[in-house]
Amino acid sequence: MENIFVIGGASYNSVITLDDFPEAMPQTIHNCHFNETIGNTGAGKALTLSKLGFPTTFHSLIGNDSFGEKVTSYLQEPNLNFINDIDPKGTERHLNIMNDKGERISIFMNPSSDIPDIDYSKFEKEVANANYMVVNIANYCRYILPVCKQLKKEIWTDLHDYDGKNKYHQDFIDAAAYLFLSSDNLPDYKSFMETQIANGKELVVCTHGKDGSTAYTKEGKWIEVPIIKDYTLNNSNGAGDAFFSGFLYGYSKGYEIMKCMQFGTITSGLCIESEMITSNKLSKRYIEKEFLEYYAK
């Protein structure tokens, strides 16, 4: 399969799951589900893509600490080459509070460095060898954008819960040919998608959680795909990254956009059933079997 280079986003997270978010008042909560695991958008994409058979190189910042060792241990997977630079601030850590609807409050307990001391020219080989270049929106990743432009590489990026106006995202929007985002903070997502296609983007895809996903193509075609209701929600962490990866799997095979979105729907559905940011069931063979089950009847 084709090579993928993913840059940005690995953390070691504490995840608390409650029936409902607590009210904003002093209180004691006696029962919750708690686990600690690898997290963040780059790790989610890299793990999922590698399980789908892509030779995947993943770069992230980690600390010279026990949390960095734990992150590295999770990334010892076939098809996955993890490379890193040491962050003097230590490994990024998040506290994610989840409710039974799959909603999340994410608290960055230790964010990564915004401008680490990195010579970005050292990535030229990985960028040149990549058939797909996935640049996540960690701040340090914006400095690899000139390298991608120099080597004429099309960029895939995920804006997550972009609100349509935050200037932080603009470098990534300007550089990318393929844009993914969530409608969580962008009710008028269709206008944004139309504007981006008018600005020359190849494709824009927006996910809506339990309300499925929407794509808008450069031919001006809208495509809507609902979720698969048979997948039982256990933990929504990583679902957006799983959708992105499943979509890219279909795209790499030359499938039409509708079919790519259906593969994204399958991989995100498998993700929400797992406590991890990627499903242990995941493989090319398994998602092809699921596709036949749900879409080829």
Image (cartoon, grey):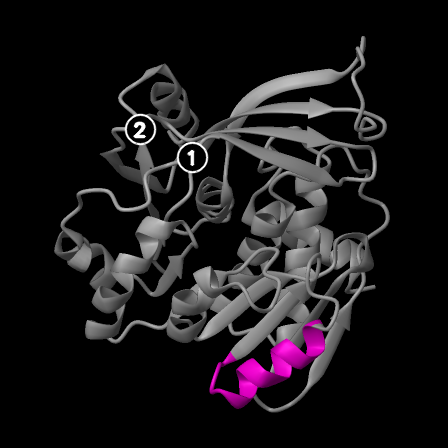
Residue drawn where x is 42% and y is 71% of the image: 176
Tell whether 10 sits left or right of 159: left
Badges 1 and 2: C-beta atoms under 8 Å apart?
Answer: yes
**For the stretch drawn in magenta, what is the main secondary structure?**
helix
- What number of labels is visible? 2
Residue drawn where x is 72% and y is 77% of the image: 223
Q: Is 198 covered by the magenta stretch?
A: yes
* Mark 2 Cα-neighbour bin, 10 Å: few <14, some 14–19, many ≥20: some
Q: Quadrant of residue 79?
A: top left
**Residue 89, numbered label:** 2
Residue 100, how many percent across, how many down?
83, 33
Residue drawn where x is 79% and y is 28% of the image: 24
For the residue labelled by badge 1, is the local secondary structure a helix, a strand or a loop? Answer: loop
Whether residue 34 is visible: yes
Residue type at tag 2: Lys
Residue 259, how many percent across, how many down?
66, 69
Q: Write down the residue under mark 1.
A: 111
Q: Which quarter of the rendering shows the C terminus?
A: bottom right
For the residue labelled by badge 2, is the local secondary structure a helix, a strand or a loop? Answer: loop
Q: Quadrant of residue 99?
A: top right
**Residue 92, numbered label:** none
Upstream in sequence: badge 1 or badge 2: 2
Most foreground residue, 229 or 146: 146
Residue type at tag 1: Pro
Magenta span of residues: 189-202
Tell whether 86 sits left or right of 62: left
Residue 157, how many percent across, how many down?
46, 62
Residue drawn where x is 32% and y is 59% of the image: 142
* Mark 1 Cα-neighbour bin, 10 Å: few <14, some 14–19, many ≥20: some
